[in-house]
Amino acid sequence: MRIAALLLASSLILPAASFAADTANSQQNKMAQCNKDATGKSGEERKQFMSQCLSNKPAPETQQQKMGRCNKEATGKKGDERKQFMSDCLKK
């Protein structure tokens, strides 16, 4: 009975430990990559870069990227419809 309980407990604990190790490795890999990408930055600029890099949020879209995306989405629209669409799209 004790052996069965021990086997059951170990079968539940080992996958959890493996998952925790994978998560830690993933975070370590992310930290290493962000440190490599931050080369040449210092002070407040580096702090902001590292914060953004380590968060799960994607980098904010630049105005130029936004314009390109909105232009692609506006294909086929003309006149006032396009003007209104572009205005709304660029505000997002």
Image (cartoon, rainbow, N blue to C red):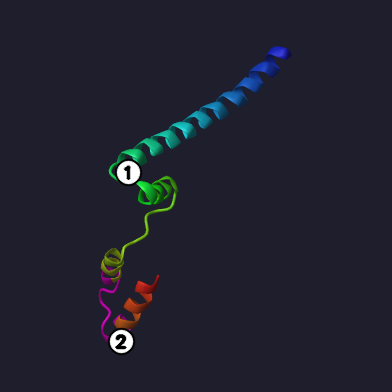
Residue at coordinates 62% horizontally, 20% vertically from top-left?
Answer: 10
Given residues 49 and 86, the one toward you in this image is: 49
Q: How crowded is mark 2: few (under 14 residues within 10 Å), some or many (20 or more)?
A: few
- 20 relative to 6 in the view: left or right: left
> Where does residue 81 sit, x and y in percent of width and height?
32, 83
Query: Which structural element holds mark 1?
Result: loop
Residue 52 magenta-highlighted: no
- In terms of image quadrants, where is residue 4? top right
What percent of the width, then of the height, locates residue 83?
30, 82
* Residue 85, disc: none
- Amino acid type at circle 2 is Asp
Q: Indicate whether 9 appears above or below 68.
A: above
Q: Residue at x 48, y 34 (%)?
A: 23
Label 2: state its secondary structure: helix
Q: Report which residue position mark 1 lands on.
A: 38
Residues 5 and 53: in front is: 53
Tell me which residue sits at (49%, 29%) in the image.
21
Name the image quarter holding the C terminus. Answer: bottom left
Give the quarter of the figure containing the N terminus. top right
- Residue closest to the eye, 70 or 28: 28
Q: How crowded is mark 1: few (under 14 residues within 10 Å), some or many (20 or more)?
A: some
> Residue at point 39% right, 51% down?
44
Q: What stretch is highlighted in magenta?
A: 71-82
Name the residue furthest right: 1
Residue type, numbered disc 1:
Ala
Residue 10 higher or lower than 33, as above or below: above
Q: In this view, does 50 lie above or below 5?
A: below
Position of residue 64 measured from the top left corner of the image (x, y, whole percent): 26, 66
Q: How far apart are marks 2 and 1 (CA)?
A: 44 Å
